[in-house]
Image: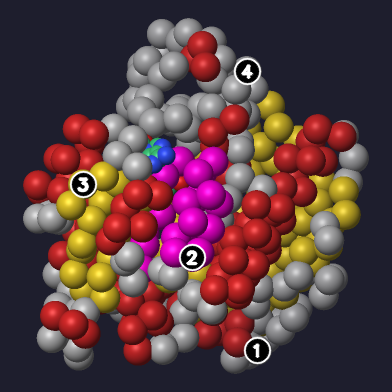
Amino acid sequence: MAKRKEDKLRVAFIGAGGIAGTHMGYYKDMEDVEMVAASDLVAASVQRRCEEYEIPEAYPDYKKMLKQVKPDAVSVCTPNGLHAPCSIAALNAGAHVIVEKPLAMSAREGQKMLDAARKNRKKLVIGFQHRYEPRTQFIKKAVDNGELGKILYGRVQALRRRGIPNWGVFGRKDLQGGGPLIDIGVHVLEATHYVMGSPKPVAASGSTYTYIGDKKSNVLSQWPDWDHKSYTVEDLAVGQIRFDNGATLSIEASFAAHTEDQWNFTLMGEKGGATWQPTALVHDANDHMVSTKPDWLPSGPEANAFARKMRNFVDHVLYGQPTMAPGDHGLMVQKMLDGIYQSAEKGREVAIK
Ligand SMILES: NC(=O)c1ccc[n+]([C@@H]2O[C@H](COP(=O)([O-])OP(=O)(O)OC[C@H]3O[C@@H](n4cnc5c(N)ncnc54)[C@H](O)[C@@H]3O)[C@@H](O)[C@H]2O)c1
């Protein structure tokens, strides 16, 4: 492992809010990473983060930081609307990029990010962590080994009964691109799409509904008093995707819906099926319907999916190891999100190109 100062990966940050703190926490323990600078529009935020993680330079302007610091790699941790401009600026400045989920606010923006990575011969990784989870890997191996046969259908659920963020800009469509579908649906969607073998999406249909978030509410919940006046995203999104291999996927995502909380996916294949939680494979054996559950899944630090995502990014950039979350996986997921939002607007199925 590279330990000499000159061999270390010099990492900088654009956005120094909540998730940037998580990135910093993992980089801090890596011997082959040096955190060199961070930027945030809010001077107090970036100052606090830099003090907390002993990062020597704080900038209010990320362009200035890129120019002066010339980092090897950048963690883009801004609201969704800035993922594309910040990632493209970092790639053009010669840095590799890990951008937080979702890839961007739209596939058009996402494509420009992939183009910038290719043009500059730099790596662009999408910060999807759920594919690194042991339970996801268990199901992925079963799919890859053919135990489920051809996958016909994936069901994705990221449902909060009442969980509208009361911080950040998560209720602002202009800054985020959407609500629960793009913010939390994307997590379970990326894991499901990955275990399905990342098939190419070709059509989408969907509906979105806003009926709670844009009004003041007295209902007691974990995150009360969100900014209902600036709330322009959906409370609930439902959609269906068709893939070029004939498989379909349905998704339900909510910040607020009259249902139980759910965070799960289900697969149905010709020979077997799978559920993420509780983790199980279902199939036929010895003339019976049976379930197979792993007797043990790692639960210690080695199971920390976020830690593995950060380590994989560094290994990919420094040592050329393959990434499990390349930018084009982010783009396919983005196309599905875009398709569902577009279909909801148009009131009909839309083609995905
Ligand atoms: N992978 C995960 O599990 C996970 C979890 C939470 C958030 N996220 C993603 O991370 C991103 C940020 O979310 P968050 O929870 O950290 O939000 P946050 O609001 O806590 O942080 C965002 C920060 O970006 C800063 N910012 C805004 N404009 C900027 C600019 N022009 N230059 C520099 N900084 C700027 C804000 O001031 C803020 O400090 C979102 O895209 C979100 O989807 C991912």
Q: Are marks 3 and 2 in contact (CB under 8 Å)?
A: no
Tell me which residue sits at (82%, 75%) in the image: 245
Residue 226 visible in rendering:
yes
- The circle on residue 146 is 1
Left or right of residue 199: residue 309: left
The image position of residue 324, as x and y in percent, is: 48, 77
Determine the secondary structure under disc 3. strand
Tell me which residue sits at (33%, 84%) in the image: 318
- The circle on residue 211 is 4
As measured in the structure, the alpha-carbon distance from the residue carrying label 4 to the one carrying label 2 is 40 Å
Residue 275 vs 168, above or below: the answer is: below
Q: Nearer the viewer, mark 1 or mark 2?
A: 2
As measured in the structure, the alpha-carbon distance from the residue carrying label 4 to the one carrying label 3 is 41 Å
Kind of residue sitting beneath label 1: Gly
Determine the secondary structure under disc 2. helix
The image position of residue 290, as x and y in percent, is: 57, 77
Residue 147 in the magenta stretch? The answer is no
